[in-house]
Image (cartoon, coloured by chain):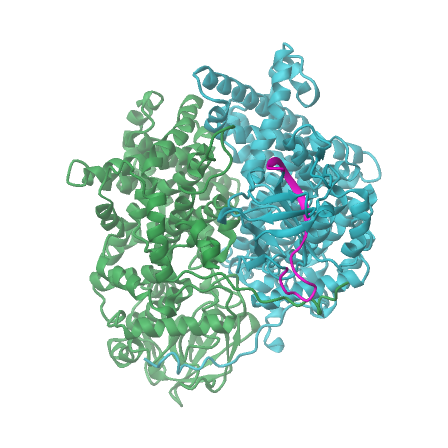
Chain colours: A cyan, B green
């Protein structure tokens, strides 16, 4: 063999990565190719503002900032380069003042602004948005919300100014999803008035802690608190884990979780504590405190309730992860659709030009059905955001954010995969973004609550409400009130209805939800009657539980969506309502078409199923002329897109080698 | 802010990657944790040989070779490191003699041995298997099969000895899937007795060519051949693209396709030809040649037929990609199932130990249904391999390999995603392999024929066979012969049948296929009657076309599977047949349960659908005690698995920091 060591791999010029200047060039070239006269039937700018929902100026300002060289998209970095780049980018955003008062402003306005910033950053760099979510959203918020007022005042200025870089040490090797089981211990000694924090076994090592491997100097550490030998449950402590110069704090051992499939700008780490001494005033004391003599006081009746309240205070995560999912789907669809509008392949025999990808039926369905879903989810998500900003109806917030996070991140994963495949090899090339963001964001489906576990939580929360209605002899209240009309519902001849109408979608979704919860209740009762424990009966019904939760969440999504469209209709945004109506109909049709549960439970007849099936392709074809306007309404600037979103031939031309 | 540039990222020890020594340690530790007494009901070693099918010694020898340090799994390399590592690994395998006579041995034995080698290498490193597939399977085979005997004899020794490193320059920027449209030109000049190869426009640049960016010195270049101004269609030429020292050949310009989401060991490149002079005898002349005076002779009546034959000779690709898909699913499932057998989370209130992941219903279904599918596909694939080795029934080989490649690579992508999610964050960690192989192999769903295009080809090939049967007044021959008994078929009361029996599955699958092809024919005729062109009618029916192709392929899969199981049953391998029967039943049940088409077309009633739905979870639970034995039967050595497949706590223990 020509020995491989002798085979010189000669240097060849690497492809140019996108940067704002190049992006502007592309945009100019693409105009002729893509922006042919098309039947723009709605105001794209107004749809953009509607979808973006809030803080338009902040979002635009960040997109402008991303023109700076430090933000140019880069691929194939080493772990170290990627981590350093994340720190560098953070610094630039920090110094530009975007994050001033981010933690201390606890108004709806403050919350929504932080969300808008995190969302915009997530359009560019997932590591960067997680880095900041960890520092401000978890570490900082823990101090603000779990610390006493005095504690918050003492530390927040340094945290907001990034003089105290922090991490959030909750999960352990042995307990990731089930954090109630963590084993780290904090024992109070009244003599020294210190806690001693200790990792009692290998499974109790803090694991996956973002920032713990290298960058964080401080940590909020969750541990089982003991005073006088008695365990009071899980409490948060502010712990120094490194000196400012990076040397480890005494008795703290840090290690690196190592390379991941994405998110390598985050230095996830491991922490072991060997009797780390922590002064009394480092127990974050809003919900419980210890007196110097060791007396323990809690504001909650049970330690479970206290831990629930502590985590509940930090729910921003699920809402912002759901938003991130939708945003990544938008990026993938924008790139794949713009490519489909210029790329040609095969064609009728004898035709001069090959056929545009976008003119293939299969391509329309594969990209426009996810586009419709994305728009429906965005509208519904904006309603959830409102609830979260206002912090109202916390129970519903918990249920909806769980369900939305699950369905929206799964939607993201499926959509990015579809977009990747729809672009063929080009979708696999890093500079075209779809592949990289697929990897960067894949973790979203399991973190801050694995999606399957979140759906279990949705069903668990809704079932008692359903049962109360059943017990009241069918007088349902709240969400299930529609079941009071179920005789009318059954009489309603959905077979004769136009499957595009909101009413059809709502009734079908309601009937599915009602049928699944009724069945779940029946199945659980039967299993318990046969002597099964509550836990076993639930576990045994897991598939049904998941379907019920999905049914609930899809119903809520469509209800929120149609309610909002009704608001728009007839007014100045009637044009927007019109195109979104097509999206809503396609979303509903596609949901029914791909899930056998509707037929299996006889919610629909095979005739209706056939009609719905045909509508999917029809509605996708109807949406085709609006595809470019719809993705333009996402408002993603060219430098956050990819070469194939513009003139892919010009980008790859000889002249540009 | 503590300026990020001032934030020293202190070094921490990186986690230890698996290597054979570590892997042996884990294996020892894991034995107690996983290999508890279990009801092993079948001979695992015999099942392994059955699934592996052939060349057991070669496969084992390669797995042994992979204990050498150069083969230790590595992550987070730079592009350059990864490419160099691929070359280094290739050299070691080459020098160990595995690839002697690989191209020149054109017997079934030779073909199956090369397949076994490529498969085994693919278990370790996808770049490496593609690197070798390109050099031997595409470049070398093109010279061997498209060159004259004299040409093959002249060059094969140097190609097999790796003194001529080659690439395969077929696809262009403008033509990836539709290679018939390539635009590179080769013009013959009788005066100089040379061809001149030229890239006429940017879209004609050779693109995605594996090896072209750096490592290849030679290339088989496909170009439109012109003599005396007349175009004869696409022909292959052997072209020097670089000197042995790596400097580019005159008039050849190479560029780098750059970073990808995976497969970065392959230096995919771009080639431009500026009137490159190629001597007359470099036209690979088995199918057509040019006399010195410029007279053109072809062995085929049409240029389309010749190009078809040329590509047909190189069909190994789809079979080996299908095999690669199944193999990666095996790796992902082995890791995820072994983790599920030791990882605990949540549990009944008051129970001492948390519940094993494997004891959760949802977890059983999410992992054991794909396991059953993997086993069914492996058995069917082995039958396809036999056909390919023997090169018999080429038409069927084309249809089956297209359908299998599509369904098996999609199965891989779905299974790896499920396995990744089933392992939570651990599945996202590179050392645990699932995430990286997901990325490395994601390209499989679109290369060597995009899956959606392959399914179109399946339907297009089968429809005429169906039509012939219809025209013969219902006397179907060959594959569709079962339709001759369709009255009997309709009379057969599937509602009363045990949904676990092979007969049930076969009948349901047949009825679906028959119904879809009948509908496709009807729909196409209706559209043509309305004046649609053939092309438009087909395009308009794309969703139906895809469903018909899927129905055909799933029927073939199950038929091949059950036929093989029947052979095993009653004999020495009856124990194997028994457990595989459960897998077959689960595969069929799961296929029916997730695809609404069976209900929509009234192939099954809602009652049957309910029974099938319940069977999925029941069968998964039945398979649970065999899960570890089944994945053991894949025979994947510990050093090709991952830390979480063994004792994940011991691996992460403090003692090993």
- Asked if residue A245 is among those painted magenta in the image, a careful observer would answer yes
Left or right of A237? Residue B424 is left
Q: Residue B541 in the image: state x and y as whole percent.
A: 50, 42
Residue shown at 44%/54% (left/top)? B651
Q: Work out whether residue B481 can be spotted.
A: no
**Membership of B17 in magenta stretch:** no
The residue lying furthest to the left in this view is: B571
Q: In the rendering, at what x and y percent does residue B186 appear?
A: 44, 78
Task: Name the quadrant containing residue B513.
Answer: top left
Q: Is residue A41 visible?
A: yes
Seen from the viewer's position, the closer of residues B87 and A265 is: A265
Q: Nearer the viewer, residue B126 or B592?
A: B126
Quadrant where the N terminus of chain B sits is bottom right
Q: Residue at x 54, y 54 (%)?
A: A422
Q: Residue furthest top?
A: A473
Q: Relative to A567, is B108 on the left or the right?
A: left
Counting from the top left corner in percent of width and height, residue A260 is at 53, 57
Q: Residue lying at the far front in this picture: please name it.
A: A191
Q: Which residues are magenta?
A: A228-249
Whether residue A140 sits left or right of residue B288 in the image: it is right
């Amino acid at each position: 063999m020509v020995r491989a060591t002798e085979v010189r791999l000669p240097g060849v010029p690497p492809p140019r990565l996108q940067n704002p200047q190049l992006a502007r060039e592309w945009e100019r070239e693409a105009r002729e190719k893509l922006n042919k006269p098309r039947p723009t039937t709605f105001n794209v700018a107004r749809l953009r503002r509607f979808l973006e929902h809030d803080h338009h100026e902040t979002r635009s300002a960040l997109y402008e900032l991303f023109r700076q060289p430090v933000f140019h998209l880069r691929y194939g970095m080493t772990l170290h380069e990627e981590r350093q780049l994340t720190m560098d980018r953070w610094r630039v955003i920090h110094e530009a003042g975007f994050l001033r008062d981010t933690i201390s402003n606890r108004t709806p306005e403050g919350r929504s602004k932080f969300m808008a910033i995190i969302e915009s950053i997530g359009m560019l760099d997932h590591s960067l948005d997680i880095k900041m979510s960890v520092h401000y959203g978890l570490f900082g918020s823990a101090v603000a919300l779990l610390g006493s007022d005095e504690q918050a005042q003492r530390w927040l200025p340094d945290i907001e100014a990034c003089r105290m870089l922090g991490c959030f040490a909750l999960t352990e090797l042995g307990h990731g999803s089930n954090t109630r089981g963590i084993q780290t211990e904090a024992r109070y000694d009244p003599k020294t008035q210190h806690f001693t924090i200790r990792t009692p076994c290998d499974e109790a090592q803090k694991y996956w802690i973002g920032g713990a491997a290298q960058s964080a100097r401080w940590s909020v550490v969750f541990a089982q608190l003991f005073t006088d030998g008695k365990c009071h449950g899980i409490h948060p402590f502010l712990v120094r884990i490194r000196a400012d110069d990076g040397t480890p704090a005494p008795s703290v051992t840090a290690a690196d979780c190592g390379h991941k499939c994405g998110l390598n700008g985050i230095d996830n780490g491991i922490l072991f504590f060997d009797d780390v001494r922590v002064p009394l005033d480092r127990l974050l004391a809003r919900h419980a405190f210890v007196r110097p003599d060791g007396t323990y006081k809690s504001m909650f009746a049970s330690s479970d309730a206290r831990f629930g309240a502590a985590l509940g205070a930090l729910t921003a995560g699920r809402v912002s992860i759901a938003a991130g999912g939708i945003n990544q789907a938008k990026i993938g669809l924008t790139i794949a659709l713009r490519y489909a509008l210029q790329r040609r392949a095969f064609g009728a025999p004898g035709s001069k030009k090959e056929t545009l990808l976008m003119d293939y039926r299969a391509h329309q369905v594969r990209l426009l059905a996810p586009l419709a879903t994305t728009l429906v989810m965005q509208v519904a998500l904006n309603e959830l955001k409102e609830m979260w900003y206002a912090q109202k109806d916390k129970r519903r917030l918990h249920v909806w954010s769980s369900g939305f996070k699950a369905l929206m991140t799964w939607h993201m994963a499926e959509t990015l995969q579809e977009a990747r495949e729809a672009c063929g090899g080009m979708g696999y090339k890093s500079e075209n973004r779809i592949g990289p963001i697929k990897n960067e964001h894949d973790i979203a489906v399991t973190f801050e609550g694995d999606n399957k576990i979140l759906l279990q939580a949705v069903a668990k929360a809704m079932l008692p409400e359903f049962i109360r209605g059943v017990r009241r002899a069918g007088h349902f209240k709240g969400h299930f009130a529609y079941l009071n009309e179920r005789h009318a519902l059954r009489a309603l001849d959905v077979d004769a209805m136009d499957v595009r109408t909101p009413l059809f979608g709502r009734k079908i979704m309601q009937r599915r939800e009602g049928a699944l919860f009724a069945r779940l209740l029946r199945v659980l009762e039967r299993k318990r009657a046969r002597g099964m424990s509550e836990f076993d009966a639930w576990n045994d019904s897991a598939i049904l539980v998941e379907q019920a939760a999905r049914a609930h969440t899809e119903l809520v999504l469509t209800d929120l969506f149609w309610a909002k469209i009704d608001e728009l209709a007839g007014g100045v945004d009637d044009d927007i309502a019109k195109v979104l109506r097509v999206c809503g109909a396609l979303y509903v049709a596609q949901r029914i078409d791909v899930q056998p549960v509707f037929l299996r439970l006889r919610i629909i007849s095979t005739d209706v199923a056939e009609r719905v099936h045909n509508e999917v392709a029809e509605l996708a074809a109807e949406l085709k002329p609006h595809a470019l306007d719809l993705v333009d309404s996402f408002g993603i600037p060219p430098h956050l897109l990819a070469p194939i979103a513009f003139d892919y031939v010009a980008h790859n031309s000889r002249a540009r080698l």
